[in-house]
Image: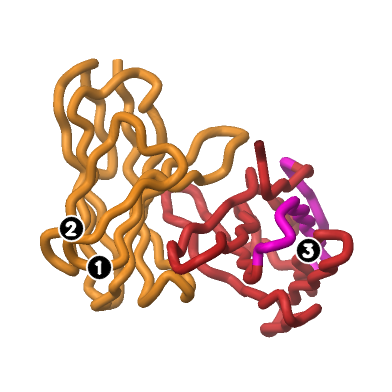
Amino acid sequence: DQQVKQNSPSLSVQEGRISILNCDYTNSMFDYFLWYKKYPAEGPTFLISISSIKDKNEDGRFTVFLNKSAKHLSLHIVPSQPGDSAVYFCAARGSGNTGKLIFGQGTTLQVKP
Amino acid sequence: EAQVTQNPRYLITVTGKKLTVTCSQNMNHEYMSWYRQDPGLGLRQIYYSMNVEVTDKGDVPEGYKVSRKEKRNFPLILESPSPNQTSLYFCASSFTGYTEAFFGQGTRLTVV
């Protein structure tokens, strides 16, 4: 049972345009959400996070939006650059101090020059 | 440089031959964990450790063992590997269970 879902396996956008990556979750107890970026042959690297008490968090070109009522979050990249081409994973932190991250399946973003 | 180091990066082995994947972090992190990544499933937690000598099961612990004798090291042990353990494995560490995790570069394991 997938508690965190990224329903789009891939996304292709033109350089300079906006990239929007989506993520849905089912457990209303999740209190913290993260986005990780992964290049081939490398481990995931932390990109941006958001607490459930906020609805938006911004860091440079990256903004994460959280809609708790819809159990939906999205990552916006503006403007998109070819170097942003990677697999993006959405993750939710599980309850308690176990530190467990529950990941979505990932979305492969391709930014075309 | 702050990092999580896994070895080996690539490994092909035969069914039943015990193996260990090592993981070491130099950030003095309390918390360490192992994940496996499979197509269409994202990353799933295998085991985690909140501190030295404290380990616990994640979502997919069957067929794996871990130990945490020192703060910096968290090896993953497959006593009798099977083909369904063919996967991409990541070790991760963080200051606590509440802070973001840093991941190693991954170990691609194939069991034939």
Q: Foreground: A112 or A35? A: A35
- The quarter holding residue B29 reads bottom left
Per the rendering, the colour in which chain B appears is orange
Which chain can be seen in red? A
- Please provide percent x and percent y for residue B94: 38, 71
- Do the dots labelled 2 and 1 sit on one chain? yes
- Tag 2 residue: B68
**Residue in view at x 11 percent, y 60 percent:** B69
Rounded to the nearest whole Å, what is the CA distance between mark 2 and mark 3?
A: 35 Å
Find residue A42 and report its horizontal and vertical position in percent: 42, 54
Residue A73's mark?
Answer: 3
On the same chain, marks 1 and 3? The answer is: no
Q: Mark 3 Cα within 10 Å, few/some/many (few <14, many 20+)?
A: many
Magenta region, residue range: A9-30
Distance CA(mark 1)–CA(mark 3): 32 Å
**What sort of colour scheme is used for the picture?**
by chain
Horizontal side of B56 relative to A108 (left or right) equals left
Q: Secondary structure at mark 1?
A: strand
Tell whether A63 sits left or right of B62.
right
Q: A94 or A18, which lies in front?
A: A94
